[in-house]
Amino acid sequence: MTTELQVFYRIIVIRLSREYAMNPAEHHVVVLGATAKPDRYANQAIRLLREKGYSRITPVHPKLSESEGIPVINRLSDVPEPVDTLTLYVGPASLEPMIEDIIRLKPNRVIFNPGTESRALQDALDQAGIPWEEACTLVLLRTGQF
């Protein structure tokens, strides 16, 4: 598939998924790169997800035990249920060793927050037919586009 067709396909899938968005309480969001530090964007995303009614939030971090009172999963391979959205808060160098785990997770979509863009992961997602977008989770939530 050409790059232009991949981009077009990705845009259509993302728009359709938003058009037929599920109830936030039913939407499972995995936050990769969760943190307990309240000033960090990943932590702000967890708080804003809760404010917007998302109750199925799974923070992932290799060493933490909880973030915002939610138990943290230490490995993507331990995420217990199907994932609607995987939102990324780790840099490309950290993401690349996790590509196979992300593909195995089969999220319905992946959000590359600013600074997390990884061509290798984006190519792997394209090959696996998993939609992705470069966007800011906080902005998507605040503008009703999540």
Image (cartoon, rainbow, N blue to C red):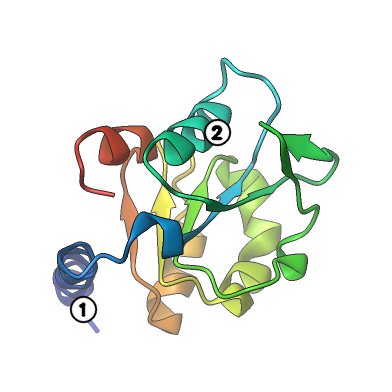
Element under label 2?
helix
The image shows residue 112 at horizontal and vertical percentages of 42, 48
> Label 1 amino acid?
Thr
| Residue 135, quarter of the rendered image | top left
Q: Is residue 115 visible?
A: no
Tell me if residue 92 comes above or below residue 107 in the rendering: above
The image shows residue 90 at horizontal and vertical percentages of 60, 41
- 10 Å neighbourhood of mark 1: few (<14), some, or many (≥20)? few
Tell me if residue 68 comes above or below residue 97 in the rendering: above
Q: Is residue 139 visible?
A: yes
Q: Which mark is residue 42?
A: 2
The image shows residue 125 at horizontal and vertical percentages of 44, 72
Q: Which mark is residue 2?
A: 1
**With 5 as the anchor, is 65 left or right in this view?**
right
**With 48 as the anchor, is 56 left or right in this view?**
right
> Are the residues tagged 1 and 2 within 8 Å (C-beta)?
no
Tell me if residue 84 comes above or below residue 49 in the rendering: below
- Give whichever of discs 1 and 2 has the lower sequence position: 1
The image shows residue 126 at horizontal and vertical percentages of 38, 75
Element under label 1?
loop
Marks 1 and 2 sit apart, C-alpha to C-alpha, by: 33 Å
Q: Which mark is residue 45?
A: none
> Label 2 amino acid?
Ala
- Quarter of the picture containing the N terminus is bottom left
Tell me if residue 33 comes above or below residue 35 in the rendering: below
Q: Residue at x 77, y 38 (%)?
A: 66
